[in-house]
Image (cartoon, rainbow, N blue to C red):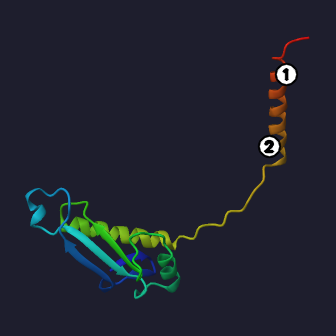
């Protein structure tokens, strides 16, 4: 079971974990030991609330399949256990990021003093440049 927050958790039977051979470092074990992890999480058939399902399915992520299955491949570490923990941590991170609601931006304008200061600086710069001209 993965605990997302105080009142939201994902049962372990909804997460599918397969061990595969990892590419890259591994020494003599690289062709013998299946240390990489393929984690599959079926979003539409999960026990998550509908609002979280919608947000996860709306993600523009290459790890999300057409069927709504999130596939995470973890092969950074040499042991199965570390790679499994890494994959679960990344799943937790994706779900918590999808839960965050972005605040709507309110357009603002510069204040009266800021506008006055800007025009004063422009006038000052203009007088400096005017002083560079030839005196007639």
| The label number, if any, that marks residue 58 in the structure image | none
Q: Residue at x 30, y 86 (%)?
A: 13
Residue placed most toward the observer, 68 or 124: 68
Q: Is residue 83 above or below residue 122?
A: below
* Residue 12, horizontal then vertical, whole percent: 30, 82
Q: In this view, does 72 lie above or below 24?
A: below
Q: Residue at x 53, y 70 (%)?
A: 100
* Residue 99, horizontal then vertical, whole percent: 51, 73
Q: Which residue is drawn at 81% across and 33% down?
A: 122
Cα–Cα gap, marks 1 and 2: 24 Å
Number of other residues with Cα within 10 Å of mark 2, as a class: few under 14, some 14 to 19, many 20 or more: few
Task: Report the quarter where the N terminus lies.
Answer: bottom left
- Image-quadrant location for residue 41: bottom left
SS of the residue under disc 1: helix
Q: In this view, does 68 lie above or below 61?
A: below
Marked residue nearer the N-terminal end (1 or 2): 2
- Image-quadrant location for residue 2: bottom left
Name the residue tied to disc 1.
Answer: 130
Number of other residues with Cα within 10 Å of mark 1, as a class: few under 14, some 14 to 19, many 20 or more: few
* Residue 37, horizontal then vertical, whole percent: 24, 70
Horizontal side of 30 relative to 50 (left or right) equals left
Task: Name the residue furthest top.
Answer: 136
Horizontal side of 106 relative to 93 (left or right) equals right
* Residue 50, horizontal then vertical, whole percent: 51, 86
Task: Name the residue furthest right.
Answer: 136
Task: Report the quarter where the C terminus lies.
Answer: top right
SS of the residue under disc 2: helix
Name the residue tied to disc 2.
Answer: 114
Q: Nearer the viewer, mark 1 or mark 2?
A: 1
Residue placed most toward the observer, 116 or 73: 73
Residue placed most toward the observer, 74 or 88: 74
Horizontal side of 51 relative to 90 (left or right) equals right
């Amino acid at each position: 079971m993965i605990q997302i927050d105080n009142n939201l958790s994902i049962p372990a039977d909804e997460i599918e974990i397969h061990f595969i051979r990892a590419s890259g470092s591994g020494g003599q074990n690289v062709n013998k030991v299946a240390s990489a992890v393929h984690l599959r999480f079926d979003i539409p058939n999960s026990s998550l609330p509908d609002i979280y399902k919608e947000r996860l399915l709306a993600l523009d992520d290459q790890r999300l399949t057409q069927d709504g299955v999130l596939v995470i491949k973890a092969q950074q570490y040499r042991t199965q256990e570390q790679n499994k923990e890494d994959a679960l941590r990344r799943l937790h991170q994706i779900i918590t990021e999808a839960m965050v609601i972005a605040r709507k931006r309110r357009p603002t304008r510069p204040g009266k003093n800021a506008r006055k200061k800007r025009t004063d600086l422009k006038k000052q710069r203009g007088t400096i440049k005017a002083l560079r001209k030839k005196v007639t």
